[in-house]
Every structure is written in structure tokens, then in C-alpha cells.
Image (cartoon, helix red, strand yellow):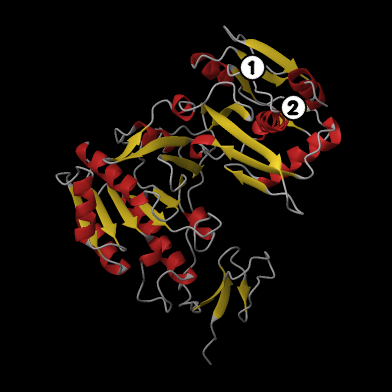
Amino acid sequence: MAKGPNYVCSACGAVHSKWAGKCESCGAWNSIAEEAPIGAGPKPAQRGRSIVIADLAAEEAPPPRAASGIGELDRVLGGGLVPASAILVGGDPGIGKSTLLLQAAASFAHTGLKCLYISGEEAAAQVRMRAQRLGLAQAPVGLGAETNLRDILATLDAERPALAIIDSIQTMWLDNVESAPGSVSQVRAAAHELVNFAKRRGTAIVIVGHVTKEGAIAGPRILEHMVDTVLYFEGERGHQFRILRAVKNRFGPADEIGVFEMTGDGLAEVLNPSALFLSDREAATPGSAVFAGIEGTRPVLTEIQALVAPSNLGTPRRTVVGLDSGRLSTILAVLEARCAIPFAGLDVFLNVAGGMRVTEPAADLAVAAALVSAREDVAIPPDMVLFGEISLSGALRPVGQTENRLKEAAKLGFSQATLPARSKAGQAEGMRLRETADLTAFVGEMFGAG
């Protein structure tokens, strides 16, 4: 008797016997989709062969890399493109993923690599129109428009490119999988075939993935485990800055970022993000604090902006852009409990300037300073940077790479820094360091509050 369909959760991969609105394994809502059963297939006629076991001390040469000439892209990839690697790129619709990858394909092609761009969402004529707008019409990049993965793999096998871009995985379909394109089973099977082809033929594969409204790549979570590198293209839709962030990289550091600016001629790389993010900063403004952060291996200075205003609502608003809202709630609670600075009856708005998203706990001190500055209407000195993690007791904890943060601040003209006590600051030439052990002492010294 034929076996019925399975229902698989796209968030955790749990298998259910029937559809449900909520996955009982991980708690995700509307993540369960029907998937056709996969047959066990014929059993092997003979036993498997033994694999070669190598010693951990064996030395291997680092993988060869091909540089694109786009410095910010090469930085995020860990130094360049690695042959036979599989790269997944995700981002909001319209953020510029296709523009970035078309420019990358043209740059790699100009270095002598054979590149193919396969579009499953747009016709070839639409891609050519974009290439003309970007001034890439004469780039030696092969172009195709197809969604049948069997035909795509046959073409790649015949052409043998060094780089193939698949835009996007949600439009690909395999005729031996009984489900619609974009379903869990189709995405998983298509990604498996593409990754296998990359490893067998030595072709670097770049796969574009759609994202959900929560910002995660749509489809089964196993998709991110199958590839070597996962990149997210981030940015505010109405802002010109774009951030390419590596959240996973088997060939380089994770959490590395590349900064781009959207212009009329496409994406232009930003060589000094700190100077760009602070270029429009107004001097001596209440509610403004400069945070010296670390993104991957590079120090980046960003402005934290806060606005505190009386609320006429029963529940005051807490609006945050570029920072975790839970972190904001924690900092507000610490300020109220440890520093006796109430925020009840006040609307709080927090923003990270430039479209950046800050995930470091080291930003706690800058966030707290911006909040108190806005509430007390007292400006923080414009030549000061702040960083440090705040514990629930109100103590300030040291963070890593203090010396690199201070060097970047000094390079941009900042002359003083507030940081936790016992930080390994080293020699900070031209910087006046203000070390403090707890948040209460900092608030009292800086604002005369608490």
C-alpha cells in the first residue's frame, strides 16, 4: 500500500503525520508544509568500502582564492572566492541582491573566470536591462533564464564555469519531486543537487534565497547547514547604505561585514564605514552617543540616537531600529532599578544611524548614555566614544578588542573614551580614557543624575 504524504516543519525539520498550524517540536506557527514521501530505494548489493582516515597533524595548503576586485565583497568571503564552495545569499526583496551579484559576476569575469548567471525570477531581457543601467552590458558573463534544475545542471556540466549564480533557489524545481517550486521538499532537494555539483565539478555556486518577514532565509533550516557560506544583505529600504554580513563562513571569519552605498550606477563599496556613518552627525546633541563596535575583524563607529518624550498612552511606546528590542527593555530596567531614573510614562525611541544593525552587548553603555542624555536633555561631549556591557546588577563589564576600538576612534578625531574598568586598553595615543566600574557612577558623573 502506498505511503501517505508527510508534513514537515520548515523551521526545525520535524515530521508530522497531519497538518497543524503550530509545530509541537519548536513552537513555530504556519511552518508545516506537505512533503511527498521519499522511497527507500534498492538496498546495496555489497558492503561499503572503508574511508581514508588522516591524522589531525597533517598539513594542507590553504584553499586557492580568486579575488573579485570588489574589496568589501572579498573581505566578507574571507579573502576571495574559493573553488567548489557553495554560498547562500539572503536579503529582503528589492534590497539589491541581484544588483550585487551581477556586479560580482562581472568583476570575477574580468579577472578571467568563466561566470554564468542563471535567473529563475526574471527573463533574460530584464537582466540585460539591469546590466545596461549598471554599465555592465559588455561584461563577459553568460546569461540564462530557466527554472528546471535538471536542464540547469546539464548546462553547467557542459559549460564548466568557475562561478555560477542561481537566482533564486525558491524558483527552482526538480521533476522527480512531487511538490510545487518553493516548497520545503523542492528547496531542500534543489539545494542538495547544487551543492553536490559544486563539490564534484569544482564550480563555485552562489544561491540566492528569499527571506521571511522575520528576516530568516525561507525554506528548511537545513539549507544553511548544507552550504559553506551564508551571507545576509541588509539595509533600510529608504536608506542608501547596504551591509553584506557573513553569518557563517567555513573559509573565513563569521560576522564580517562589507559596506556598500546604493548609487545610480549600482552598489559602490565604502572603504571607511565609520567616517560615512558619522558624516551627518550633529555636534553636541542630546540623545546622541557614538559607539565603538567590532564587526567581524574591523572596528566600526556608529551613532546611537535616542528620543524620550512624554506619553499620553496607557502603555508608553518602545520603538527601536537597528538593535534588539529585548536589549533595550533590559537597559531601561537597569536604569530604573539601579540608577533610580524612571522611564514610566515616557515614550522611548532608539535608532542606530546609517541603517546599521548592532548585536554586540558592548553597545549597552552607549545605549544607556543616549537614553539618559535624551531624558535629561544633556549632550554627551561630541569627541567621546563609549562601549561596555551592562550587567543586571548595573556593573560594567570589559569587552574584547579594546585597543582596536580606541585606535579607530583616535583615527577619526575622537579624543576621549568611556569604558569599563579593568579593560585592556593598552597604549591609546591621544585618547583620554575614563574608566568606570558601574552604571550608577557613570550616570552620576556624566549627567549628575541617579
Expressed as whole percent of the image width and height from the top left, the position of residue 23 reads: 65, 70
**Residue pictured at 80% horizontal, 28% vertical:** 395
Please tell me which residue is depicted at 26% across the width and 66% down the height of the picture.
Answer: 146
Measure the C-alpha gap from mark 1 to mark 2.
Answer: 15 Å
Q: Which mark is residue 165?
A: none
Residue at position x 29%, y 32% from top?
69
Q: Which mark is residue 397?
A: 2
Q: Are marks 1 and 2 in contact (CB under 8 Å)?
A: no
Q: Residues within 10 Å of mark 2 (few under 14, many from 20)?
A: many
Q: Quadrant of residue 450?
A: top right
Q: Which secondary structure, mark 1?
A: strand
Q: Position of residue 326 (x, y in %)?
A: 70, 46
Q: Is residue 347 visible?
A: yes
The foreground one among 60 and 241 is: 241
Give the residue type at disc 1.
Ala
Q: Position of residue 66 (x, y in %)?
A: 31, 36
Which amino acid, mark 2? Arg
How many numbered callouts? Answer: 2
Tag nearer the camera, 1 or 2: 1
Specify the farthest residue to the top: 430
Q: Is residue 314 left or right of residue 411?
A: right
Residue visible at 16% across and 47% down in the picture? 137
Q: In the rendered image, which residue does mark 1 sit on? A: 417
Classify mark 1: residues with Cα within 10 Å, few (<14), some (14-19) or many (20+): many
Vertical side of 92 occupied by 20: above or below: below
Reply above or below: 175 against 88. Answer: below
Do we see residue 250 in this rendering? no
Residue 301 to residue 166: above or below = above
Furthest residue toward front:
312
